[in-house]
Image (spheres, helix red, strand yellow):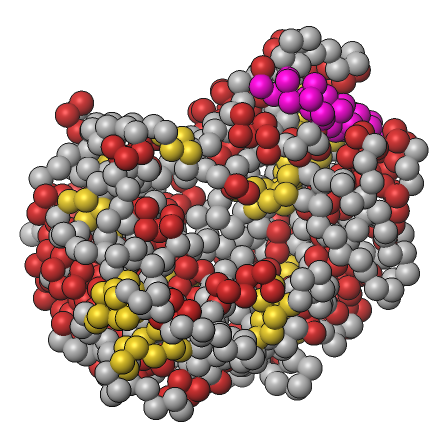
């Protein structure tokens, strides 16, 4: 109908009384309905459907693995037409996965994909693909000009180092490799020995950082494969290259292999705020976690700072299905997220106050005596005595004259000095170096039954402790006679903790600090205690972004341990941020740290592992290549001290330059101090803009060498199969770039060992390296990589050979009474090391966030307590009123909850109106909001 005619009709209809509906529709001619008795026989011509069939018809399909750092990893099927991938679907092969024992995965893992994976074609053919190799013009001139340097400082000419403002020159990959190799060689030479140290001092680096170079310029070359587990050979290869740099050091300094040093290796886990540092403080291992399908084994699922629905896309159904099966879901969050609205209950807290909230829960559980005393006594250090004079834990050798520590025999053995460490799959239990053995000695509890101090060995936990018949006191102050004839007062960790919580973290105080209603705190604590150890604490990355995140995890573990929710199916603590669990591939050192002086050329021959790399945290780099000093105190010490950075090679990472916190300072002040920045990318990222060399590499859909990965959230061993999809652009494998630069170093030095180090890349036999990793990893030993790749090509992964499905951290400890990886063998809630005592964090306490707050930053919140006696700013040599970025990180000032609420962040009087929690935009999807209005 014409629009004019329609309007006329509408106008008439609007008059109502003038025209009836019959009048209006009389002008239409109604068609009689078609009657078809049997549509299969009589259906009209369907030729028109052919056009759709033609559009969607494809020539072939292939399988590839999608594996960003989202912890999922999905084998996907690509559909190809005219050599163009036009569509992606899930493979539906997950339900067919099996382990070596024949255990099968549930069909409920299928379909495995998400909307992002299904549109990867947009990335594959996107206009930001890096097509070839590029070198920055000024960098090229610097290399080709023979590396001119300022004679006094050694600095490269500033006009040639205009990174980000300069243009790029497209070169062949071979030319890029040659320029890169020459730059590495020159940088290592320039910064070696005393002349190199003089340059670094003249450039203004902290003397401690210059000392950390130890005269080896190779230590100023830094390498980082971002989230390395996402490519056991491709990305870990960056670290293998760092190890190989020991060959260059040997040439430059003329040292023997035993004295040679490798490059610096930046690690990702802590940098991405994925690492929950409170975990190793409690149980001694990197991270405690459970695979997400454990959700339905829980009575209560506490989703804490984790946006499960949004960030765990193919595994979000485990949470919603658990709820259908009767699991209660409580979401602790800072905003009304997609996960919050799936919970039975939602508790919204002030960002960064997670440790206080957990301590508030623990307070209710302790005060109302809702804790599982048996679990506490058998599995934790809470009954352990702490002496009140020094605040050190009492050791049996201090108390009992002539005491000799019990041998370490429970799943533990002592590694004699100089003895080789056996390969991981042959280590049935822990190995403690002989030198460290005294630290693992017997400790002391107060036996309530015998009313006396007793020695307890590290081996004695769980059933082994129960067998001793001891009944340790959890509360009280005891006069303990010492072996030297003196007497000391001592209290159990439980009692010291109880006092702190009872006096500081009442529900009312917790509510004021965290904004959670006091009734919700009490109700949740009682709910957790009611579950009989079947509460799952699924903790996300959001709260990890606050400076107090170690205390957050120590406090959450305290709640879990008090209620026995550890090491059980449906009862455990997990941290979910990034794909960190490289420990599933314990054989990786056979690849990443193969001795470059002794390369194994026989595919199945034994590999000599020798680590020449030096690990460094990226935080110092991001903070401007500084270490932390304040007053007379040097906070950054020992192996934490980074070296100056002169060369960078990044693969699979955009988080260090483009997406870094403190981005402006990194780009304008820190990056100009580097002389060579190389990036491997398949998508032109912000980091590429600031690089000297950009290598365009293959996407997952174009891999010409296979690779392998796995995850912390699911049980699958995943292979990236080689794909038949032709390369769409001039790209190479990441592995080709390492081999290419190594070959150029071989030419420069005349040392063929550089080339040999990558021989199986050059021969297109990368599976040799992958098989070595499989053979060296307990959960994968027994698999043949060729079988895994053949299955992956059909869309079917394998299962990790885990002890349990779901894999359950602490299973052996809780069910078999094996020790945790701690000094006491127990879950530890007291840290008696000097740095913890100095910080006032020997007990699990609360500190206000260092930045994300409108109160006094980083203050300790506690009422006066006999065991919280930190070193004060005055003792460090600076005023407590000093609150700049440096001072507030090391400032130990104690306030009560009410005093805290009366304080102000130093920027508030200047008119600031919002707290900016994180400038990393990607964290906006990770369970924490970007800002909070004041
Ligand atoms: S969930 Fe992650 S791995 Fe799976 S398809 Fe989506 S983006 Fe890829």
Left or right of 340, for residue 366:
left
Q: Nearer the viewer, residue 630 or 785?
A: 630
The percent coordinates of residue 104 (x first, y second) are 60, 83
Residue 575 visible? The answer is yes
Q: Residue at x 35, y 39 (%)?
A: 918
Q: Residue at x 86, y 66 (%)?
A: 604
Residue 534, above or below 345: below
Q: Nearer the viewer, residue 494 or 812?
A: 494
Left or right of 754, for residue 96:
left
Left or right of 727, for residue 399:
left
Magenta residues, start to end: 173-201
Q: Nearer the viewer, residue 188 or 500?
A: 500
- Say which quadrant the C terminus sits in: top left
| Quadrant of res 138 | top right
Residue 605, above or below 406: above
Question: How many marks on residues?
Answer: 0
Left or right of 333, for residue 503:
left
The percent coordinates of residue 786 (x first, y second) are 80, 69
Q: Main secondary structure of the magenta part?
A: helix
Q: Residue at x 17, y 51 (%)?
A: 862
| Quadrant of res 223 | top right
Residue 693 visible? The answer is no
Residue found at the very far front of the displayed protein: 485
Q: Is residue 199 magenta?
A: yes
């Amino acid at each position: 109908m014409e629009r004019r005619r329609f309007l006329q009709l509408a106008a008439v209809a609007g008059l109502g009384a003038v025209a009836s509906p019959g009048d209006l529709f009389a002008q239409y001619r109604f068609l009689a309905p078609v009657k078809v008795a049997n549509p299969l026989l009589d259906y009209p011509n369907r030729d028109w459907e052919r056009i759709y069939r033609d559009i969607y018809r494809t020539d072939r399909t292939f399988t590839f693995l999608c594996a960003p750092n989202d912890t999922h990893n999905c084998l996907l099927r690509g559909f190809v037409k005219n050599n163009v991938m036009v569509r992606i679907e899930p493979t539906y092969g997950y339900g067919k996965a099996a382990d070596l024992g024949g255990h099968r995965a549930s069909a409920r893992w299928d379909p495995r994909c998400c909307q992002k994976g299904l549109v990867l074609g947009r990335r594959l053919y996107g206009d930001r693909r890096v097509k070839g190799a590029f070198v920055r013009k000024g960098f090229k001139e610097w290399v080709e000009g023979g590396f001119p340097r300022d004679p006094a400082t050694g600095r490269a000419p500033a006009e040639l180092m205009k990174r980000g403002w300069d243009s790029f020159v497209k070169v062949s990959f071979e030319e890029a490799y040659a320029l890169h190799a020459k730059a590495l060689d020159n940088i290592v030479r320039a910064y070696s020995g005393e002349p190199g140290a003089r340059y670094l001092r003249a450039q203004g680096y902290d003397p401690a950082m210059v000392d950390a170079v130890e005269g080896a310029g190779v230590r100023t070359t830094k390498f980082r494969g971002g989230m390395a587990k996402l490519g056991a050979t491709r990305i870990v290869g960056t670290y293998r290259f760092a190890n190989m740099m020991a060959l260059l050091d040997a040439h430059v300094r003329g040292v023997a292999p035993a004295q040679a040093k490798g490059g610096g290796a930046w690690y990702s886990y802590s940098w991405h705020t994925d690492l929950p540092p409170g975990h190793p403080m409690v149980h001694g291992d990197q991270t405690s976690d459970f695979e997400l399908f454990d959700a339905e084994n829980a009575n209560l699922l506490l989703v804490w700072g984790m946006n499960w629905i949004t960030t765990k896309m193919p595994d979000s159904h485990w949470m919603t299905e658990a709820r259908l099966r009767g699991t209660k879901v409580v979401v602790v969050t800072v905003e009304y997220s997609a996960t919050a609205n799936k919970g039975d209950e939602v508790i919204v807290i002030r960002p960064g106050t997670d440790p206080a909230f957990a301590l508030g829960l623990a307070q209710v559980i302790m005060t109302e005596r809702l804790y599982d005393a048996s679990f506490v006594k058998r599995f934790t250090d809470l009954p352990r005595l702490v002496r009140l004079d020094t605040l050190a834990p009492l050791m049996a050798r201090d108390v009992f004259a002539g005491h000799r520590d019990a041998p370490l025999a429970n799943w533990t053995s002592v590694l004699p000095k100089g003895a080789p460490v056996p390969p991981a799959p042959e280590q049935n239990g822990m190995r403690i170096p002989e030198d460290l053995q005294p630290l693992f000695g017997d400790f002391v509890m107060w036996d309530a039954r015998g009313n006396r101090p007793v020695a307890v060995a590290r081996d004695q936990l769980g059933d082994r402790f129960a067998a001793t018949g001891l009944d340790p006191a959890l509360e009280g102050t005891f006069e303990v006679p010492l072996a030297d004839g003196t007497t000391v007062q001592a209290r159990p960790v439980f009692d010291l903790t109880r006092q702190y919580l009872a006096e500081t973290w009442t529900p009312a105080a917790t509510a004021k600090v965290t904004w959670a209603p006091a009734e919700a705190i009490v109700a949740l604590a009682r709910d957790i205690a009611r579950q009989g150890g079947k509460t799952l604490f699924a903790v996300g990355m959001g709260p990890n972004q606050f400076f107090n995140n170690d205390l957050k995890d120590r406090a959450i573990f305290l709640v879990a341990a008090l209620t026995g929710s550890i090491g059980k199916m449906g009862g455990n603590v997990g941290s979910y941020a990034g794909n960190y669990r490289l420990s599933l591939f314990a054989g990786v050192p056979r690849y990443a740290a193969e001795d470059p002086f002794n390369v194994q050329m026989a595919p199945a021959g034994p590999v000599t592992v020798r680590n020449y790399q030096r690990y460094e945290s990226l935080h110092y780099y991001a903070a401007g290549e500084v270490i932390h000093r304040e007053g007379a105190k040097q906070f950054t010490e020992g192996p934490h001290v980074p070296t100056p950075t002169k060369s960078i090679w990044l693969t699979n990472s955009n988080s260090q330059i483009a997406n870094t916190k403190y981005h402006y300072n990194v780009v304008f002040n820190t990056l100009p101090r580097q002389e060579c920045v190389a990036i491997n990318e398949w998508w032109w990222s912000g980091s590429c803009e600031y690089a000297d060399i950009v290598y365009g590499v293959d996407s997952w859909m174009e891999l010409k060498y296979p690779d392998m990965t796995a995850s912390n959230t699911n049980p699958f061993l995943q292979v990236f199969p080689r794909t038949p999809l032709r390369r769409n652009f001039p790209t190479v494998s990441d592995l080709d770039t390492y081999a290419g630069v190594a070959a150029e170093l071989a030419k420069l030095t005349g040392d063929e060992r550089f080339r040999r180090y990558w021989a199986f890349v050059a021969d297109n036999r990368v599976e040799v390296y992958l098989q070595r990793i499989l053979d060296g990893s307990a959960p994968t030993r027994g698999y043949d990589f060729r079988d895994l790749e053949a299955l992956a090509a059909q869309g079917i992964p394998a299962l990790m050979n885990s002890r349990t499905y779901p894999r359950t951290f602490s299973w052996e400890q809780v069910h078999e009474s094996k020790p945790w990886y701690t000094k006491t063998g127990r879950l530890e809630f007291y840290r008696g090391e000097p740095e913890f005592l100095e910080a006032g964090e020997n007990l699990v306490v609360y500190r206000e966030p260092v930045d994300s707050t409108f109160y006094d930053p980083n203050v300790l919140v506690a009422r006066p307590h006999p065991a919280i006696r930190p070193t004060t700013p005055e003792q460090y040599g600076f005023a407590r009123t000093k609150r700049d970025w440096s001072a507030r990180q090391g400032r130990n000032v104690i306030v009560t909850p009410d005093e805290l609420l009366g304080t102000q962040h130093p920027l508030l009087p200047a008119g600031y109106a919002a707290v900016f929690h994180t400038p990393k935009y990607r964290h906006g999807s990770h369970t924490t909001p970007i800002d909070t209005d004041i």
